[in-house]
Image (cartoon, helix red, strand yellow):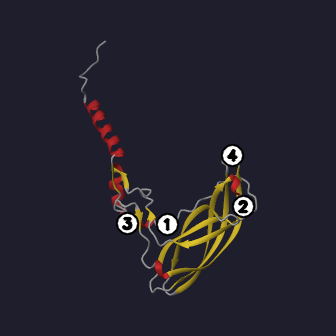
Amino acid sequence: MFIKGPWFQKKYIAFFTVVPLLMASAIIEVDDPVCDGTGIISPTPGMDNVRIIRTESTERNIIRDTCGAYLVYGYDITITAENTGPEAVAGWVKLTLIDFVRGKALNTQYIILEIDGNTTVDTTYTVWFTTGLNEKEVTEVQATLVLTDLPDPTCDGTGKIPLNTYLLVNYQKDSLLQLSQIPRPEAPPDLGFDDEG
């Protein structure tokens, strides 16, 4: 049996050239243009003029998933905040689900607080927290303003992205920077049942 044509046909050369290049570009990492390689997004200027006056939380329900071995707590959280500065700001608020008896932090979520200058606002959020199955406790939610840097979600706080995504990320840098300021609340799983707790 004879193989027709030379072994070094164009399709083989193209395959053995392009595939290794694609693999290499997925492995080689470069600085993330959104955070300039730092891995962090700095807080919004003016958030130091904002303070949380009061937080009220109401437990909506608890969803149990014994197969997945976790509980999902649903809360309605109302935050009363005051901005003593002249400018409108939008910044992060860290919500922590606390075991009331032991003072143990069970889960954390982040939300965005938007507030005009020289105003006081009441804002209500619906937030979901996930804990271990054995964590059904008397819980409360504590809210604190985030005045420090946050991990950049584009690179998961590493400051590096694969080379093959660099051009797309660099082109969409402004959009990704705005998206990093949008909270991504945890959605409860649809289990078909829920227990009021």
Front label number (1 vs 2): 2
Q: Residue furthest top?
A: 1
Which residue is the site of mark 1?
182
Q: Earlier in the sequence, mark 4 or mark 3?
A: 4
How far is disc 4 from disc 2 in space, using C-alphas? 19 Å
Percent x, y for residue 1?
Answer: 31, 12
Q: Residue at 47%, 67% (x, y): give it.
A: 181
Q: Which mark is residue 57?
A: none
Front label number (4 vs 3): 4
Which residue is the site of mark 3?
174
Secondary structure of residue under mark 1: loop
Q: Which mark is residue 137?
A: 2
Q: Are marks 1 and 2 in contact (CB under 8 Å)?
A: no
How far is disc 1 from disc 2 in space, using C-alphas? 30 Å
Q: Residue at 48%, 85% (x, y): give it.
A: 117
Q: Earlier in the sequence, mark 4 or mark 1?
A: 4
Secondary structure of residue under mark 2: loop
Which residue is the site of mark 4?
67
Q: Are marks 4 and 1 in contact (CB under 8 Å)?
A: no
Other-residue count near label 3 (Cα within 10 Å), few / some / many at <14 / 14–19 / ≥20: few
How far is disc 3 from disc 2 in space, using C-alphas? 42 Å
Percent x, y for residue 59?
Answer: 70, 67
Whether residue 125 sits left or right of residue 153 in the image: it is right
Q: Residue furthest front?
A: 102
On the question of residue 28 being in view, the answer is: yes
How far is disc 4 from disc 1 in space, using C-alphas? 31 Å
Which amino acid lies under the numbered mark 1 shown in the image of this protein? Ile
Percent x, y for residue 185?
Answer: 57, 62
Which amino acid lies under the numbered mark 3 shown in the image of this protein? Asp
On the question of residue 188 being in view, the answer is: no
Other-residue count near label 1 (Cα within 10 Å), few / some / many at <14 / 14–19 / ≥20: some
